[in-house]
Image: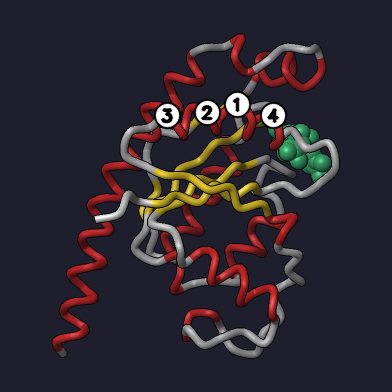
Amino acid sequence: MTRPRIGIIVGSVRENRFAEKALEWFLPIARSHPDLDFEVVDLKDYPLPFFNEAISPGFGQPARNATANKWRAKLSEFDGYVFVTAEYDHGPTAVLKNAIEWAYVEWGHKPVAFLAYGTVGGARAVEQLRTYVVELQMASVRQAVHIGGSDFMGILMNGKSIDDFPYYADNARTMLDQLAWWTETLRKGREKEAIRNAAA
Ligand SMILES: Cc1cc2nc3c(=O)[nH]c(=O)nc-3n(C[C@H](O)[C@H](O)[C@H](O)COP(=O)(O)O)c2cc1C
């Protein structure tokens, strides 16, 4: 069996985004995990319009929009996801919410974990995302990384680095272990379902 593949979805597309720092710090930790492979999927590379299809992605039909089909094809390559999550106006970024809406089948029965940041560690954005992903039939992993408070301000404004706060790496490793368990468990479940469907 091939190693599970996790897509790291970068949920901010603005210039000078903090997401770069978070990603740069997180990637080596992720790539040292013994059971998971990772690929960065940057929403900058998928300039999706606001969702405007006549037919919901829930029906699994190709979209009229070519970027959406590219986005959905990329998502389908993965067994799970990490959302790199900024908090805008006490919620997730609009660009991430919109990208979530452009797919459905591709997300289903897979786990998602969160690397979030903001004044309260992006917690309000993550809590909203957890409610969204239930509708997509995803499992949200309990442990998240929340870079927040004076740590976040120190990194954002005062030349500190995420490495100055080693507890975030501990959080990230715990999160990845939980993600690995869910990834393996749900992959087995999806395979069982595929077998059952094939036999029907
Ligand atoms: C439109 C906008 C709304 C924001 N709202 C919040 C917020 O509600 N809570 C928060 O902690 N930070 C908020 N911020 C500050 C962000 O945490 C900070 O700009 C961070 O760098 C955003 O992530 P990014 O640079 O990766 O886009 C907001 C920033 C923007 C641009």
**SS of the residue under disc 2:** helix
For marks 3 and 1 on the same chain, the one whose residue lies earlier in the sequence: 1
The type of residue carrying mark 4 is: Lys
Q: Secondary structure at mark 3?
A: loop
Cβ atoms at labels 1 and 2 below 8 Å apart: yes
Residue 145: % across, % down:
50, 30
**What is the CA distance from the residue labelled 4 to the residue labelled 1?**
6 Å
Closer to viewer: mark 1 or mark 2: 2
- Mark 2 and mark 3: Cα distance apart in space: 6 Å
In this figure, which residue is indicated by the disc labeled 2?
Answer: 28
Q: Are marks 2 and 3 in contact (CB under 8 Å)?
A: yes
As measured in the structure, the alpha-carbon distance from the residue carrying label 3 to the one carrying label 1 is 12 Å
Q: Which residue is mark 1?
A: 25
79 relative to 48 in the view: left or right: left
Q: Quadrant of the C terminus?
A: bottom left
**Residue at the (78%, 37%) spot, across then down:** 17
Q: What residue does disc 4 label?
A: 21
